[in-house]
Amino acid sequence: MTRTITIATLVCFVSATAFVSPISLNPAVAQGSCKNEAMSKDGKPLAGAAKNSAIKKCCETAAVSKEGKALAGAAKNASVKKCIAESS
């Protein structure tokens, strides 16, 4: 039995694979969302030092490599600094 693969099937498979790949699920890709996560328990946006602290904590959590491992040292500092700048 032979199976014929059409271009449309191949394109669909490749796009579905890219959508669910671990790289696309990496939290570092969504660094801008750290600003949105700076909310109080009752759902109100944080302000001032509380907002800055929440954004920094979120950015430090999001500092991971493409393989999903936590970054360290200069790479982590650069990632956190970039994330904070994008979230401000």
Image: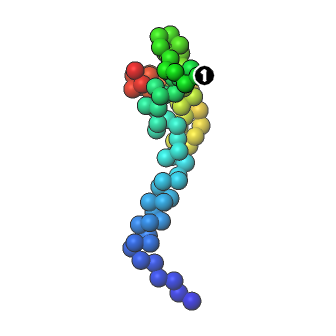
Which one is nearer the viewer's eye here, 30 or 64?
Answer: 30
Q: What amino acid is labelled 1 in the image?
A: Lys
Q: Residue at x 53, y 53 (%)?
A: 20
Seen at 44% across and 22% down, the residue is 84
User: Tell me, what colour scheme is on the image?
Assistant: rainbow
Q: How many marks?
A: 1
Quadrant occupied by the C terminus? top left
Query: 87 or 47: which is nearer to us?
Result: 47
User: Left or right: where does residue 30 sit relative to residue 1?
Assistant: left
For residue 28, above or below residue 85: below
Image coordinates for residue 63, horizontal then vertical, percent? 53, 30
Residue at the spot x=52%, y=27% of the render? 37
Is any atom of residue 74 visible in this view?
no
Above or below: residue 64 compared with residue 38: below
Packing grade of label 1 (10 A; few <14, some 14-19, many >=20) is: few
Residue 31 location in percent, x, y?
46, 32
Q: Is residue 60 left or right of residue 83?
A: right
Image vertical order of residue 64 relative to residue 41, above or below: below
Q: Quadrant of residue 70?
A: top right
Q: Residue 50, can we see it?
A: yes
Left of 41 or right of it: where is 36?
left
Quarter occupied by the N terminus: bottom right
* Residue bearing the label numbered 1: 41
Q: Is residue 41 above or below residue 3?
A: above
Give the residue furthest to the bottom: 1
* Residue 59 in picture, x, y percent from top left: 51, 26
Q: Residue furthest top?
A: 49
Q: Position of residue 19 (x, y in %)?
A: 48, 54
Indicate the secondary structure of the residue bearing disc 1: loop
Please report the residue visible at 58 percent of the width from the left and 40 percent of the height from the top.
Answer: 68
